[in-house]
């Protein structure tokens, strides 16, 4: 079983400036086996209920301003997984958490640390 990790992205400019945490994350990731999927929970989408991104190729969501313009150029071109999104919604339902799939959703800008 893969470990579960909670990694907060910290300042939005983590991806464009050399910081200890930026150097640590790729090093740590190299020590782990490749995951079959990654689930990211983000508070950047205000909604009355839990939404699970189900687009086959989600866009990168840049929902910020007043930061280094280089951040708006970063993208996380990973594929989505609509079938896994459906399974996630079903698991939420079993846990008593109402959720729906959302094909207009995207990946939080913090997903793509280089």
Image (spheres, rainbow, N blue to C red):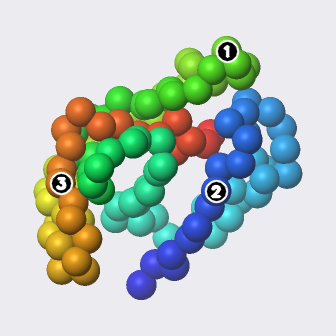
**Residue 68, located in which quarter of the rendered image?**
top right
For mark 1, give the secondary structure.
helix
Give the number of the disc on residue 106.
Answer: none
Marks 1 and 2, how far apart in space? 21 Å
Vertical comparison of 55 with 97: above or below: above
Within 10 angstroms of label 2, few (less than 14), some, or many (20 or more) residues?
few
Asked whether residue 30 is in view, the answer is no
Give the percent coordinates (x, y) of residue 39: 39, 60
Give the number of the disc on residue 69.
Answer: 1
Could you tell whether 6 is left or right of 92 in the image? Answer: right
Q: Which residue does the image show at 46% across and 35% down from the upper left?
A: 76
Instruction: For marks 3 and 1, give the one nearer the viewer.
Output: 3
Of 17 and 51, the residue lying toward us: 51
Which of marks 2 and 1 precedes in the sequence? 2
Give the percent coordinates (x, y) of residue 101: 18, 50
Within 10 angstroms of label 1, few (less than 14), some, or many (20 or more) residues?
few
Marks 3 and 1, how far apart in space? 33 Å
* Residue at the spot of label 3: 100
Q: Which residue does the image show at 80% across and 33% down from the upper left?
A: 17
Which of marks 3 and 2 precedes in the sequence? 2
Quarter of the image with the N terminus in it: bottom left
Marks 2 and 3, how far apart in space? 24 Å
Q: Which residue does the image show at 56% across and 42% down from the upper left?
A: 110
Q: Which residue does the image show at 34% across and 64% down from the upper left?
A: 36
Asked whether the beta carbons under mark 2 and mark 3 sit within 8 Å of each other, the answer is no
For mark 2, give the secondary structure.
loop
For mark 3, give the secondary structure.
strand
Quarter of the image with the C terminus in it: top right
Asked whether residue 73 is in view, the answer is yes
* Residue at the spot of label 2: 8
Give the percent coordinates (x, y) of residue 26: 67, 54
Give the percent coordinates (x, y) of residue 55: 21, 39
């Amino acid at each position: 079983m893969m470990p579960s990790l909670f990694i907060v992205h910290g300042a939005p400019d983590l991806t464009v400036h050399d910081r200890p945490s930026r150097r640590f994350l790729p090093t740590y990731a190299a020590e782990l086996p490749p995951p079959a999927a990654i689930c990211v929970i983000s508070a950047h989408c205000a909604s009355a209920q839990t939404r699970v991104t189900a687009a086959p190729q989600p866009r990168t969501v840049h929902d910020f301003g007043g930061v280094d313009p280089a951040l708006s150029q970063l993208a996380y071109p990973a594929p989505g997984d609509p079938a896994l999104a459906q399974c996630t919604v079903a698991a939420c339902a079993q846990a008593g958490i109402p959720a729906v799939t959302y094909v207009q959703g995207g990946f939080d800008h913090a997903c793509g640390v280089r």
